[in-house]
Amino acid sequence: MSENENTVNSESIHFDPNGVMVTHNIWLETPTETVELTPGHFYDVFAGSETLPIQFQLGPVKEHGVNGITNEALLAVLIHRTTILDDSIPCDENKQAITHMGNALALFNKRTADRQRCGVEGLNKA
């Protein structure tokens, strides 16, 4: 490793027939230290020659501010994109995927509403 180079240790979690790969980043090695990354927060999507990072919200918003994408935001993107694709080339699988993703989004929103009602939304507590 050169003086200014960082290395990410990761595990592959997805590889599709088009050659797109997704990794879950586990730790980061810098020239001066090794940092263990919080599980489930840092991913890289390798699409052709591009590396596209995805960083999820790390820590409660009330304590750390907004610093990453949420499950809800990512699902909204997937629902929107799949709806557009289904408008062009409709199929039952797209419609079913949209329904299931919509159900998942509704469950996440219910979880948030329940946490708001209990006064713990945005905090790192049950």
Image (spheres, helix red, strand yellow):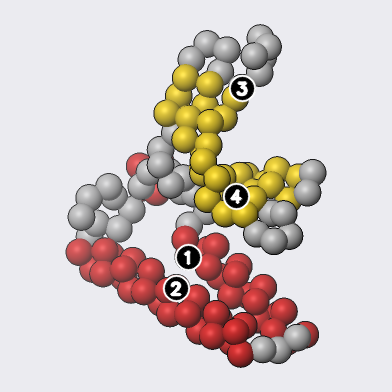
Mark 2 or mark 4: name the one nearer the start of the chain. Answer: 4
- Report the residue at 60% width, 68% height from top: 77
- Report the residue at 43% width, 79% height from top: 103
**Mark 3–mark 2 distance (CA, rounded to whole Å):** 36 Å
**Mark 4–mark 1 distance (CA, rounded to whole Å):** 19 Å
Q: Tell me, yes or no, if residue 65 can be seen here.
A: no
**Residue underneath mark 2:** 105
Q: Quadrant of the C terminus?
A: bottom left
Q: Nearer the viewer, mark 1 or mark 3?
A: 3
**Residue underneath mark 1:** 72
**Residue underneath mark 3:** 6
Q: Is residue 89 above or below residue 11?
A: below
Mark 3 or mark 2: name the one nearer the start of the chain. Answer: 3
Query: Tags 1 and 3 in contact by the CB under 8 Å rule?
Result: no
Q: Residue furthest front?
A: 17
Residue 43 placed where, x, y %? Answer: 55, 45
Drawn side of residue 58 relative to residue 93, left or right: left
**Residue underneath mark 4:** 22
Drawn side of residue 114 relative to residue 78, left or right: left
| Kind of residue at badge 3 | Asn
Say what secondary structure mark 3 lies in.
loop
Query: Tags 1 and 2 in contact by the CB under 8 Å rule?
Result: yes
